[in-house]
Amino acid sequence: MKKLPALLFLLALTIYAPAEMSVFREPGAAYLADLFTKPLKLKVLKTAPIYYDAPMTRSLGVLQPGQLVEVQAVLEDNLRVVGKARQGQVAGWLPASYLEPLDPDFLVKVKQAAVRKTQIDALIEKNEVAMGMTADEVTRSLGKPPKTRQRQDASGSSEVWEYIRYERVPQQTTGYDSAGRYVTATIYVKVPNGKLIVSFENGLVSAVEQSEGTLQPGNKITIVAPPIIIR
């Protein structure tokens, strides 16, 4: 079997590979998987050319009208979608005008969600928690809680997570080494240095309490907007 030239091989991967195999991200584009948990699907209204890149310089084929495509990313008036062309499944860019109109508030929600993601990423980078975060975001920031408790009542569900922070405290030890010499060494012992209690109401952080030390700089509790929902 003859080997494909490198360029043709890459093109074949672009055309036939599943969407999740796509690696390159267009600068400035908002990728919906980073922002929303629910996929957005739109109908193709007319025969639509689809391209490998957002500048639309390299054609992948055409999408036939009537099919539903999943929107992966937004860049101004262009969308990256996954759909079916004649040669199989493709993932690429096309003008939004070829698809059924977006909800008028959609682009506003995308911008709001992108701002929120930037805030959440910054908190997670510093291992901090904010009111309005989801349980998954808190776990990404602090890890799984050592202790939890839950409650369910007529107003909804609530949950409390407890975290304990430890610090490494140096201690001096003395003894004899394998050559019989008397030596002094430093060991580090884990000592509890603070407790953080995170309360959730219906899946979002509703309160953060610190005690027995400081887990977050300056004892400041940030508030972020709740996750943006698309319908």
Image (tube, grey):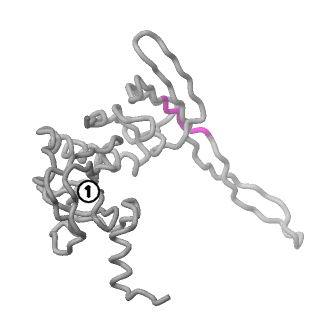
- Which residue lies under the disc numbered 1? 81
| Residue 200 to residue 82: above or below | above
Residue 194 is inside the magenta segment: yes
In the rendered view, does 130 fall on the left or right side of 228?
right
Report x, y in % for residue 111.
19, 46
| Residue 149 to residue 117: above or below | above
Q: Residue at x 21, y 49 (%)?
A: 66
Boundaries of the magenta span: 192-197
Report x, y in % for residue 55.
15, 69
Q: Quadrant of residue 204?
A: top left
Closer-to-camera residue (220/71): 71
- Decide: few, some or many residues near mark 1? Use Cα within 10 Å; few <14, some 14-19, many ≥20: many
In the rendered view, does 40 fall on the left or right side of 54?
right
Could you tell me the amino acid type at mark 1? Val
Residue at disc 1, secondary structure: strand
Residue 100 is inside the magenta segment: no
In the rendered view, does 187 fall on the left or right side of 140?
right
